[in-house]
Amino acid sequence: PLPLDVTYFNYDDIRWGSADHYKEFEEGDIRQFSQLALNNTAVYQSYPTAEISLSDYDNSVRDLEALPLEEALSLLKKDCDMDWPVQTARENYQKHGSFTTYTLPDQEIYKIDYFDVDGDNKDEAIVHKNYNCRADGGSTSTDIVKDNKIIFSATGDDATILPAETSNGFYVEQRLSDDSARCCSTGVLRSRFVLKDNQFVPIYEQEVKYMQVQEPESN
């Protein structure tokens, strides 16, 4: 860690670490915490490149194969003796609709975001998934769902899809390749996708590295 005073940084700069959950509650003094990750224009990061290394994505359009809820839950119960996956599946069904069963029984939906990715002024469903009945943190992946079809999937290590500055496309973020066995990533590979000829294609990517800081010891 660099011996920098953590009061130089804002809560908005925190990406992971012991201070992360305090962003939501605006509690405490930031000087208590040591692990911060930066996403700040005042701090050096890498430069974007048009040489795309990201390969763990699928930009084909696929039909959504959603099972009836009780049938999907029956399969899930056979594969898993835990209660929470069944409860989560029911909650997703009630909140977001019948299409949510398409991930069962193998994967659970832990979050669904909604934003426009193709410029039609209509929000698509951004479906964040993880493995059901996992013994550890698993590895997340994300689908974009539109009109009961999957129009894009990011399947890399802890892959997630984030909104871009415009309604044409999005960002895909996933762990750096050398971080797969670590509990906390040292950064992300961020790839910008846009809609071109009815298909989402990458136009540039950038490695975003985190830095760790801690308050210097007082003499």
Image (spheres, grey):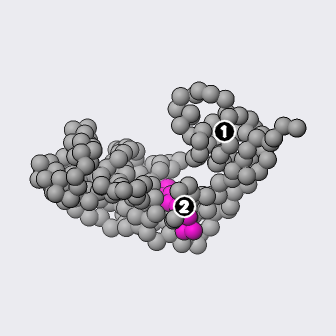
Q: Secondary structure at mark 1?
A: loop
* Residue identified by numbered label 2: 182
Left or right, 72 with respect to 92, comes to: left
| Residue 66: assigned label | none
Residue 87 sits above or below residue 130 on the image: above
- Decide which of tag 1 and tag 2 comes sooner along the chain: 1
**Quadrant in the rendering for residue 46:** bottom right
Asked whether 176 falls inside the magenta stretch, the response is: yes
Between 164 and 75, the residue placed more toward the observer is 75
Q: What residue sits 65% from the left and 46% below the top?
A: 35
Q: Which residue is mark 1?
A: 33
Dot 2 amino acid type: Arg
Disc 1 versus disc 2: distance between alpha carbons?
A: 21 Å
As drawn, the residue found furthest toward the right would be 219
Crowding near the residue tagged with mark 1, few <14, some 14–19, many ≥20 C-alpha atoms within 10 Å: some
| Magenta stretch bounds | 171-179
**Quadrant location, the C terminus:** top right
Tell me if 61 is positioned left or right of 165 in this view.
left
Residue drawn at (66%, 38%) of the image: 33
